[in-house]
Amino acid sequence: GDSVTQMEGPVTLSEEAFLTINCTYTATGYPSLFWYVQYPGEGLQLLLKATKADDKGSNKGFEATYRKETTSFHLEKGSVQVSDSAVYFCALSDNFGNEKLTFGTGTRLTIIP
Amino acid sequence: ETGVTQSPTHLIKTRGQQVTLRCSSQSGHNTVSWYQQALGQGPQFIFQYYREEENGRGNFPPRFSGLQFPNYSSELNVNALELDDSALYLCASRAGGVSDTQYFGPGTRLTVL
């Protein structure tokens, strides 16, 4: 079945550091790929998405490129801020009709001033 | 445009009891999905409803059941609660097209004692 593997956390960085959170997937067909963010005590918010190979999703300075050849969708940001501290989830949608999301286990990111 | 809302915010039950969680979809969305997020884990797909019919189910036993109403609001019912049912339950709605984005509510935190 479908699965998502993402970088184990927690990750702690200093403000303005470069961020990479790795995500790889296993899926049949051509899934859509997502990054969701969860702030403390809240539900999930969509951060960015890509629906086909070589698409780049971007939002709030975060980027991720859909790499079919390496089955990856790594999240990057050039300069992180304290407000980026949250848990980040990589996910895929199978696009077979019910659009269920399969999530990774999440990566907790803490940014220190 | 109102977002996805869920009630209650928190709930404490004892083992063996039954619980009903509620979700109001975002305006214009006819598809709702429910997810279970155990502490420190990614959300797991429970099931999805489209126009009041179940349209996909994850690996959850029959004591997890749901309803979707004509106004597209939804309920998740769990019978014979077990300690492992303690989790954050997330509802997500989408407009229903292929690859449409799912929008999540803030969740209901269920504790089973």
Image (tube, grey):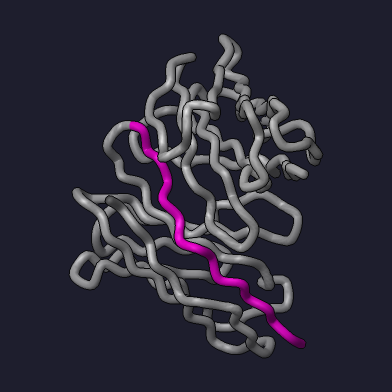
Residue B69 appears left or right of B44? right
> Is residue B75 magenta-colored?
no
- Which quadrant of the structure image shows residue A53? bottom left
Q: Which is nearer the eye, B108 or B11?
A: B11
Q: Residue at x 68, y 72 (%)?
A: A85
- Which quadrant of the structure image shows residue B77? top right
* Observer able to see residue B83: yes
* Observer able to see residue A49: no
Q: Position of residue A24 (x, y in %)?
A: 34, 68
Q: Residue furthest front?
A: B16
- Which quadrant of the structure image shows residue A82? bottom right
Q: Position of residue B63 (x, y in %)?
A: 54, 27
Q: Where is residue A73 in the image (x, y as percent from the top left)?
A: 36, 67
Residue B9 appears left or right of A91? right
Instruction: Using the image, determine if residue B76 lies above or below residue B113.
Output: above
Which image quarter is the C terminus of chain A in?
Answer: bottom right
Q: Which residue is drawn at 48% across and 58% down?
A: A48
Q: Which is nearer the eye, B10 or A70?
A: B10
Residue B3 appears left or right of A68? right
Which stretch is magenta?
A: A98-113
Q: Where is residue A64 in the image (x, y as percent from the top left)?
A: 41, 68
Q: Which residue is drawn at 42% across and 28% down?
A: B96
Q: Which is nearer the eye, B1 or A107?
A: A107
